[in-house]
């Protein structure tokens, strides 16, 4: 549509030019013909004479020129009857009689009243207004300086992203000066920051409350410009420029604070190491106590187990002791019986020796092979004793001893029999 508009404008201008050229050409031809005809038809005074003076010349084509002019005017009026608004922009219809009309014209083609209405076009895309913290020919923008609470001048590099509200373009056109960025946004930004900066000291603006200052200023700028139909997208605080002397002093102070923080951190680390050592000592102490308690419990359990075992072992030990006593008693009785038997054997030997001395042997036949008179030798009688093995039952020992005594008595009787 924009190309068509320009084409119609060119055609209209061409028609206007053609009409003018046609009239000028006809006038030129008429003048040239008049000169040719009047060259030899003049008197001595130079005045025209005869009927040629009243002869009409070729007329100028005023009608054709008027038609061409009318066609060109119509084409120009047609081109002025519609307006084309490009992308990223919006327009306001402005009347020569009533001023800015309500409503917004968005991108596209719109019909207007020629020679009465016009279109004021505004850029509705996001725009950026920026300031610089210090004068620098390489950077473009307004210089913005504020004063902190101490009275020191601080340079601020601020960027504000904003756009015009398309719904309020008629109000912006009627009420705000143009251009909006330079005449409205710039004064608002500088005023807000200069109002807020004295609430903070320089150190706070530079370090601790920089974000707070930016947030507060962004809220105030957004609210102030929103009342004028300007939408603020974002407010950025890009850079700060401190006075040179203050920057040097602040740098030294920061170095001292960093050293102090480093020492504090080292002290804290050593304190934690001491605490860890104490905790390890307490843990070791607790482990030792637990280990000692465990060992004591083990000993208690061992003692309890031994006590429980003694309840079953003691009767067995008692029986073993009684068995040992009985065996010892048996051996004692056996020893006594052997001693008695030995004494009786000696008595018998003595008696036999006495009897043999008193009565010589008168036995017939061959003497007994055991001795000269058929009697038993004393050592053979002594050898008749029988070794009695210890036994648990005392009655068996007694019976064995009685049997041995009986054997000795029988041997004595046999000896006397043989001697007789």
Image (cartoon, rainbow, N blue to C red):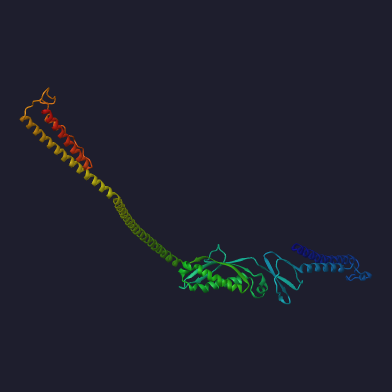
In the rendered image, the quadrant that contains the N terminus is bottom right
Identify the residue at horizontal 83%, vertical 69% (top origin): 70
Q: Is residue 93 left or right of residue 40?
A: left
Q: Quadrant of residue 125?
A: bottom right
Q: Is residue 166 visible?
A: yes
Q: Position of residue 32 (x, y in %)?
A: 86, 65
Q: Position of residue 328 (x, y in %)?
A: 20, 43
Q: Is residue 84 above or below residue 175?
A: above
Q: Quadrant of residue 222?
A: bottom right
Identify the residue at horizontal 18%, vertical 42% (top origin): 333
Q: Is residue 190 left or right of residue 54?
A: left
Q: Is residue 183 above or below residue 6?
A: below
Q: Is residue 242 visible?
A: no
Q: Is residue 204 left or right of residue 309?
A: right
- In the displayed image of the protein, which residue is found farthest to the bottom? 98
367, 109: nearer the viewer: 367
Q: Is residue 134 above or below residue 379?
A: below
- In the displayed image of the protein, which residue is found farthest to the right? 51
343, 74: nearer the viewer: 343
Q: How many marks?
A: 0
- In the displayed image of the protein, which residue is found farthest to the left? 358
In the rendered image, the quadrant that contains the C terminus is top left
Q: Quadrant of residue 158?
A: bottom right
Q: Position of residue 268 (x, y in %)?
A: 37, 61
110, 309: nearer the viewer: 309
Q: Position of residue 318 (x, y in %)?
A: 25, 48
């Amino acid at each position: 549509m924009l190309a068509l508009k320009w084409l119609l404008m060119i055609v209209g201008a061409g028609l206007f030019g053609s009409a003018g050229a046609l009239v000028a050409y006809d006038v030129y031809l008429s003048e040239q013909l008049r000169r040719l005809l009047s060259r030899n038809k003049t008197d001595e005074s130079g005045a025209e004479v005869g009927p040629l003076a009243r002869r009409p010349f070729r007329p100028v084509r005023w009608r054709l020129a008027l038609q061409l002019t009318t066609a060109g005017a119509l084409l120009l009026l047609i081109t002025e009857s519609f307006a084309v608004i490009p992308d990223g922009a919006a327009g306001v219809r402005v009347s020569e009689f009533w001023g800015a009309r309500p409503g917004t014209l968005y991108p596209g083609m719109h019909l207007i009243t020629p020679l009465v209405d016009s279109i004021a076009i505004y850029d509705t895309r996001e725009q950026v207004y920026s300031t610089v913290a210090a004068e620098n020919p390489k950077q473009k923008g307004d210089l913005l300086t504020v004063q902190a609470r101490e009275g020191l001048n601080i340079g601020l590099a601020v960027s504000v992203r904003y756009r015009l509200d398309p719904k309020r373009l008629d109000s912006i056109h009627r009420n705000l000066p143009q251009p909006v960025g330079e005449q409205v946004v710039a004064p608002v930004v500088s005023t807000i920051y200069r109002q807020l900066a004295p609430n903070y000291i320089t150190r706070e603006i530079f370090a601790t409350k920089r974000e707070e200052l930016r947030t507060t200023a962004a809220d105030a700028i957004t609210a102030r410009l929103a009342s004028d139909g300007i939408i603020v997208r974002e407010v950025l605080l890009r850079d700060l420029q401190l006075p040179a002397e203050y920057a040097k002093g602040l740098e030294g102070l920061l170095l001292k604070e960093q050293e102090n923080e480093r020492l504090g951190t080292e002290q804290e680390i050593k304190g934690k190491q001491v605490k860890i050592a104490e905790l390890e000592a307490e843990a070791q102490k607790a482990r030792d106590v637990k280990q000692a308690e465990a060992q004591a419990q083990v000993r208690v359990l061992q003692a309890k187990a031994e006590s429980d075992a003694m309840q079953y072992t003691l009767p067995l030990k008692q029986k073993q002791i009684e068995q040992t006593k009985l065996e010892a008693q048996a051996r004692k009785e056996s020893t006594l019986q052997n001693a008695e038997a030995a004494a009786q054997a000696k008595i018998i030997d003595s008696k036999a020796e006495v009897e043999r001395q008193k009565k010589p042997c008168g036995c017939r036949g061959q003497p007994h092979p055991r001795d000269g008179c058929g009697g038993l030798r004393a050592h053979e009688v002594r050898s008749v004793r029988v070794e009695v093995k210890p036994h648990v039952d005392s009655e068996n020992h007694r019976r064995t001893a009685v049997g041995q005594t009986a054997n000795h008595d029988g041997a004595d009787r046999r000896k006397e029999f043989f001697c007789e």
